[in-house]
């Protein structure tokens, strides 16, 4: 999942303590790099000394060296049940989980490792990457920001931190990281795209458009780069600038459903309902999760008095996101046309409720208040 520079394959040594002759022999084999023989020797020790925490931990270490990570984890768990505070045990356990891409399982032992040694950049980095891989982006930022400061030249670490910031909607942090990456590789289409996303998240859409234009210039064949530019133009109501960008994406990928949907929306805005419906139907035939397409289809079908089809389309849009007022407004208009006055009034009341909530949320953000 992560670049090899992040695998951090160095497994920490376990503490030396007084040992039985059998344990001493197993340790000698391990020190000689004979990990297969060492694992067998440690296994024999654990059978005779089931409460020997060092034997279980060392068995895990030998299994990890053999890249048998499931067996290593099993041994580490046995050791932890005896003494969870054995130095290096939790880090080795977390690393073995991480190397299997068991990122959720790695978090517990890595947190314990970092608590035991707050200066461990290995534990901190692995923990941040595990949070990133499990979609807990805010937590990932907390750990990776410190790790990246400790390793400022690590571009891959900056990239993961930047994406964590972006996904956590910490746009200022994301922008700082992407701008750093852009200095390292000014011709990277991907970095321009991500910088544009961060700028757009900060409400700086005109600057975001410039970043996407730079991305297109760097590599117009990058997947979704033309769509991203088109979307920003569309969002800015620059529909005729958006059109060629969506068309460029479709030239590369004729089944790019979102480009079809937004082109359909532009045709609808231009009063070309037949062209719009054709594009919208093609879009949802490829991707059934396009809320905008269903709203537009419902609008067109309502105008054509195909009420049952319109209702089906709008209900699909509502199911995808009940918090957007536009679908409830369209449903209200449809129910009015169908003579269903009570249903229409209910939908219009819902429109007002959602608009009031949006205004309340904006006012709270502007005043610095928090949701209750």
Image: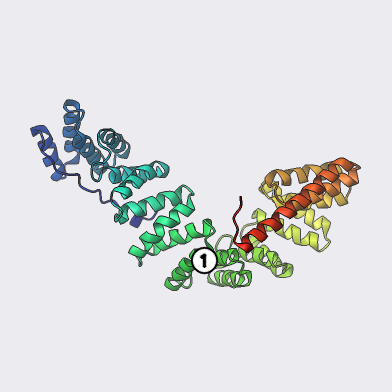
x, y percent for residue 159: 44, 62
Q: How many labels does the image show?
A: 1
Q: In this view, does 172 lie to the left or right of 22?
A: right
Q: In the figure, 11 relative to 159: above or below?
A: above
Q: In the figure, 188 relative to 49: above or below?
A: below
Q: In the figure, 276 relative to 321: above or below?
A: below
x, y percent for residue 305: 89, 47
Question: Does the image show residue 298?
Answer: no
Q: Quadrant of residue 203?
A: bottom right
Q: Residue at x 67, y 63 (%)?
A: 246
Q: Name the residue under label 1.
A: 172
Q: Quadrant of residue 319?
A: top right
Q: Nearer the viewer, residue 90 or 66?
A: 90
SS state under label 1: helix
Question: Among all residues in the image, which is located at the extreme top?
Answer: 48
Q: Nearer the viewer, residue 304 or 367?
A: 367
Q: Which residue is drawn at 39% across and 45% down?
A: 107
């Amino acid at each position: 999942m992560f670049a090899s520079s992040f695998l951090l394959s160095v497994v920490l040594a376990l503490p030396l303590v007084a040992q039985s002759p059998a344990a001493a022999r197993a340790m000698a084999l391990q020190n000689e790099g004979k990990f297969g023989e060492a694992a067998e020797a440690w296994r024999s020790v654990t059978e005779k000394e089931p409460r020997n925490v060092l034997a279980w931990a060392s068995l895990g270490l030998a299994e990890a060296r053999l890249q048998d990570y499931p067996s290593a984890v099993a041994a580490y768990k046995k050791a932890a049940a005896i003494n969870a505070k054995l130095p290096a045990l939790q880090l080795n356990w977390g690393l073995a989980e991480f190397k299997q891409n068991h990122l959720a399982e790695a978090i517990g032992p890595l947190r314990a490792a970092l608590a035991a040694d707050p200066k461990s950049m290995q534990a901190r980095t692995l923990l941040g990457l595990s949070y990133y891989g499990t979609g807990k982006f805010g937590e990932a930022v907390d750990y990776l920001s410190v790790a990246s400061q400790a390793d400022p030249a690590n571009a891959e670490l900056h990239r993961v931190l930047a994406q964590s910031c972006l996904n956590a909607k910490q746009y200022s942090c994301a922008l700082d990281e992407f701008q750093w990456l852009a200095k390292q590789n000014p011709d990277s289409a991907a970095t321009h795209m991500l910088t544009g996303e961060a700028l757009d998240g900060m409400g700086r859409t005109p600057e975001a458009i410039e970043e996407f234009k730079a991305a297109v210039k760097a590599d117009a064949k990058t997947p979704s780069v033309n769509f991203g530019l088109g979307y920003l133009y569309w969002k800015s109501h620059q529909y005729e600038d958006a059109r060629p960008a969506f068309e460029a994406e479709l030239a590369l990928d004729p089944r790019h459903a979102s480009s079809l949907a937004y082109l359909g929306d532009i045709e609808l805005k231009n009063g070309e309902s037949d062209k719009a419906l054709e594009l919208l139907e093609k879009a949802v035939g490829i991707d059934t999760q396009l809320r905008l397409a269903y709203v537009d289809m419902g609008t067109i079908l309502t105008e054509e008095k195909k009420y049952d089809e319109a209702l089906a389309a709008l209900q699909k849009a509502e199911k995808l996101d009940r918090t957007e007022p536009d679908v409830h407004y369209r449903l209200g208009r449809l129910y009015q046309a169908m003579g269903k006055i009570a249903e229409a009034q209910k939908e219009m009341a819902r429109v007002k409720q959602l608009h009031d909530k949006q205004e309340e949320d904006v006012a709270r953000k502007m005043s610095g208040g928090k949701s209750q």
